Image (cartoon, helix red, strand yellow):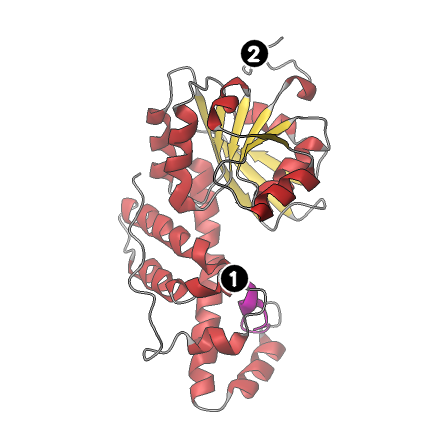
Amino acid sequence: MPSVGDTEHSVGEFTVGLLHPGTMGTAVGAALVARGVPVRWVSAGRGPASRQRAAEAGFVETSDFDALAGCRIVLSICPPTAATAVAAQVAATGFGGIYVDANAISPEHAAGLGALFRPEVRVVDGGIVGPPPRSAGTTRLYLSGSAAATVAELFEGGPLRTIVLDGPVGRASALKLGFASYNKLTFALAAQSYALAAQHGVEAELRELAGETLPDTPLGQPAQLRSAGQKAWRWEGEMAEIAAAIEAAELSPDLLTAVGALFARWREHRDDEDVTVAELLAALRVSAPGAGPPRGRRPR
């Protein structure tokens, strides 16, 4: 059987470990299953929702991390605040294949993960841009690192478009965070704008104005804030990672720190499908129960 470094191989010769089957991870793993790639996941510590998603996607359940040691590739798709802990758990199994970190972490954080693993492990840096990939043309996976092409080959012909970037681990993360720093800040700016307008009774007028002049933005479509509120518990940590990357580039992280504090005010609405825009705007008021300062940055 070829090694993970061979260029001539069948995708059926790979077993992929997936951590963890959230909404995004499940869709990415399902794209592999559809190509005949066995996908394992670790059920220890996971809830019934994860178990249901994994079962419906056709993943093979294993009870502990040790079973991942035999995988050719392990793919980590988790909140950025958990990226280091997940990598350390895989490293502790004696895993010796390709480790793909596809989380929204800083380039420095991504590069530092290699120190956790045995010398033969090749770390690939990944950045996912777009929604969970269920149809072609919606989502990209940028990859960098010496084994990036091997990982990209696994997804060929599926709904997830893979793009290999020349250069070392960290380049994919830099691109992902560069895009996210703009994209996610637009939601924070729209929320702040509507909160101000609501205070002065001109929320409807702002909605009409933005709908006419900026129709494809969160300002023009404020209902998009509901989805942002449900995901802000992850975006808060992502802002900390972007701030770290900004600081490493000798730029000011103040803007990202402030946006992280805004997203922190929406923590209680994690995965809350019933949250309203009015509730999210009310949470931004200084007099509202605060969520405290942004979480500390993860080790790089």
The structure residue drawn at horizontal position 67% and vertical position 32%, both measured from the top left corner, is 32
Callout 1: SS: helix
Instruction: Name the amino acid, label 1.
Output: Gln
Quarter of the picture holding the N terminus: top right
Q: Position of residue 26 (x, y in %)?
A: 61, 42
| Residue tagged 1 | 230
Q: How crowded is mark 2: few (under 14 residues within 10 Å), some or many (20 or more)?
A: few
- The residue segment tinted magenta is 218-228
Quarter of the image that includes the C terminus: top left
The answer to which of marks 2 and 1 sits earlier in the sequence is 2
Residue 143 covered by magenta stretch: no
* Numbered marks: total: 2
**Cα separation between marks 2 and 1:** 41 Å
The residue that disc 2 covers is 3
Residue 118 higher or lower than 246, as above or below: above
Q: Check the image and name the residue furthest to the bottom.
A: 201
Residue lying at the far top in this picture: please name it. Answer: 1
In this rendering, the answer to whether 76 lies above or below 176 is above
